[in-house]
Amino acid sequence: MVTKQGSGVSGQTLDKSQLLRLYEQMTTIREFEERAGKEFAAGKIPGFVHLYAGEEAVAVGVCTHLTDDDYITSHHRGHGHCIAKGVSLREMVAELLGREAGACRGKGGSMHIADVNKGMLGANGIVGGGFPLATGAGLTAKHNGRGQVAVCFFGDGAANQGTFHEGLNLSGIWKLPVVFVAENNGYAETTPVAYHMSCRDIADRAAGYGMPGVTVDGLNVFAVYEAAGEAIARARRGEGPSLIECKTYRYHGHFEGDTILYRTKEEEESYHARDPITALHRSIIDRGIAQDAELDEIDKRVQNSIDLSWEFAEAQPYPSPEEALTDVYVKYP
Ligand SMILES: Cc1ncc(C[n+]2csc(CCOP(=O)(O)OP(=O)(O)O)c2C)c(N)n1
Ligand SMILES: [Mg+2]
């Protein structure tokens, strides 16, 4: 069954500390991404960088329900998932800069940050690469029998990969505790969803794999939080997988350096007018949960921790050449 939720969900069940935490995490992701964009433009970050700004409500609305014992899989636009799952900012920046102190000792870079101690099984440069990993993690969780959940974040483009269908089918058959979270940001690289997808909503596909599917406003962190809460609780109870589609938008180009010739300024502005962090800020103030000054303090704290993580990472050494031969499957004699 597919249910559609609009923007009207207001998060009335969340208390002050929970609301401020959502705000702090979403702001951390936004500021992290804006800084990464600037540093990339200054030539400081090697390789490709795909920024998550605009989509923060999805990672945070979902990961708020998870512990370090739960698993997530991510994709090429993975910084937001790492932050929401608790990966250290210092290790993330060091990874972006290819330093030894990076989350993957500088070998992964932006597209391959992983931290298994936090249940973050990896960002992934292979579109659709997360489905088999999340399905396998779900199988592990089921065998462990302690109520763990695996969440698979993926884009609209990834929903057309064979791995999507295989992962959802197996999870459906085996009733695995996996929550598939589609981040439908309207484009796969430069191709609009209406051109590349055979149905309007990704959630419509859930029925084909025997699981519930829901489409929510991915710019509304409360809508994401509520839908994710239900799906995750269901998975923990052993009732099987779910698919949540979050309609969202990426503010930056597909990658840093993209000239963005495939969408209009009007479209971009219409999404900026519905900014997920501004909306949360407004909701907190309007409901009298906190004053501007308290949120300003959070903004400052976030800025400071990002500044410190860059200072830390830039002072770290690069790995030694021998490091290239460690953590590999086959050892060179
Ligand atoms: C298997 C594979 N095919 C193609 C690519 C090239 N590629 C990188 S990102 C991307 C589009 C992904 O779109 P979507 O899943 O919607 O994620 P978004 O970038 O919008 O977050 C493509 C085609 C790739 N990295 N891997
Ligand atoms: Mg997309």
Image (cartoon, helix red, strand yellow):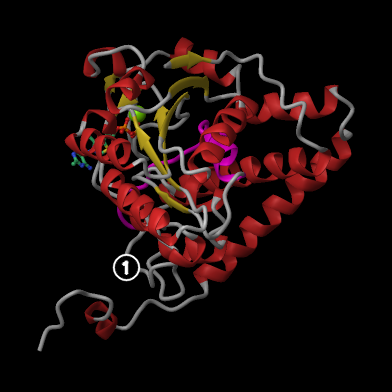
Look at the picture and state if 129 lies above or below 157: below
Q: Nearer the viewer, residue 19 or 267?
A: 19
Instruction: Name the image quarter holding the C terminus.
Output: bottom left
Q: Is residue 97 left or right of residue 21?
A: left
Amino acid type, callout 1: Lys
- Residue 310 visible within the image: no
Q: Is residue 331 left or right of residue 201?
A: left
The image shows residue 240 at horizontal and vertical percentages of 41, 38
The segment highlighted magenta reads: 45-64
Which residue is at 85% across, 34% downward? 292
Which residue is at 74% across, 30% downward? 281
Which residue is at 28% across, 13% downward? 199
Instruction: Name the image quarter holding the N terminus.
Output: top left
The image shows residue 273 at horizontal and vertical percentages of 60, 16
- Residue 266 visible within the image: yes
Q: Is residue 268 left or right of residue 302?
A: left
Q: Nearer the viewer, residue 94 or 158?
A: 158
Q: Magenta includes 281? A: no
Q: Quadrant of residue 252?
A: top left
Q: Residue furthest bottom?
A: 333
Q: Quadrant of residue 167?
A: top left
Image quadrant, ligand 1: top left
